[in-house]
Image (spheres, helix red, strand yellow):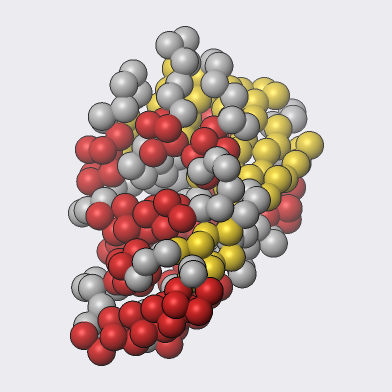
Amino acid sequence: MAIDTTTDPSKHAVSQYSATSTRLAARLAIHTWNTHTQGWFIWAGDRIPKNGSILEVGAGTGQLWRETPASPSTRLTLTDFSPAMCDELRKIPGATVKQAGAETLPFDDGSFDTVIANHMLYHVDSPDAALKEFRRVLKPDGTVIVALNGMDHLDELLDLGEKVGRPSTIRNQARITAETADTFLGKYFRDLKSERFPGAFEVQSVQPVVDYLGSLGDDGLNGEQEDIVRRVVGEAIKRDGVFRVQKNMVLFTARKVE
């Protein structure tokens, strides 16, 4: 299926993810410093049904299924618009992989028991169009599971990025966030529930912050930018023992009701 990268997904997502998975890996590395007893993927995976037919849209590197494998009876389908991500997804045992954008899914109506969108809806130009597709491909009484961040997610990290000329495109341009999820999901689904992932990130070394902020652009940080980051984060670690970054990650679940 041909993907129109001018509308689905966003140009930012195309530039960041279409040819490589390294930027996403740099961002996921911040989760190493999670203070909760469970990491995000284990925590979220415990809340996702593992039976029947499951579709994850915008599945990225497939980390959810590496950390919480599907059961042998699960019929798992993974999509991503990015060829590089699809290459990673094909390494997930038993998964069917399709290259596709969220707004034009190549599946029949009523194909899946569960549809998952894990921190990807802010990449699409039209969250409404994507949610309509999720509803279309869900079976009657099927479940949609959507993970979104709040506007204050990673504030300390992203504020530092602003100071060194590496603003967060997602934070500045997101069309849907945890704060607006009720409005968007309520148009298409019922019985909406939400649960916030507890804890924070307490980073004990400077390099993960350098790598994260470097991943926000086409190239890594230049010497001046990196010096500022190392100074600010280094001073925080020296003073507090950690560079503390708040998180606001919310898991939403809802049902398709005819």
- Is residue 19 in view from this perspective? yes
Q: Residue furthest top?
A: 73
- Is residue 80 in view from this perspective? no
Query: Percent from the top left, x then y, of residue 26?
Result: 32, 58
**Who's the residue at 58% across and 59% down the image?**
200
Quadrant into which the C terminus falls: top right
**Foreground pick, 206 / 221:** 206
**Foreground pick, 5 / 93:** 93
Query: Percent from the top left, x then y, of residue 46?
Result: 59, 30
* Residue 13 horizontal side relative to residue 55, left or right: left
**Who's the residue at 43% across and 11% down the image?**
72
Question: From what the image shows, is residue 155 above or below residue 29?
Answer: below
Query: Percent from the top left, x then y, of residue 92?
Result: 31, 27
**Foreground pick, 34 / 186:** 34
Query: Percent from the top left, x then y, of residue 25?
Result: 31, 52
Question: From what the image shows, is residue 233 above or below residue 57?
Answer: below
**Who's the residue at 31% across and 21% down the image?**
93
* Residue 48 horizontal side relative to residue 9, left or right: right
* Residue 193 horizontal side relative to residue 164, left or right: right
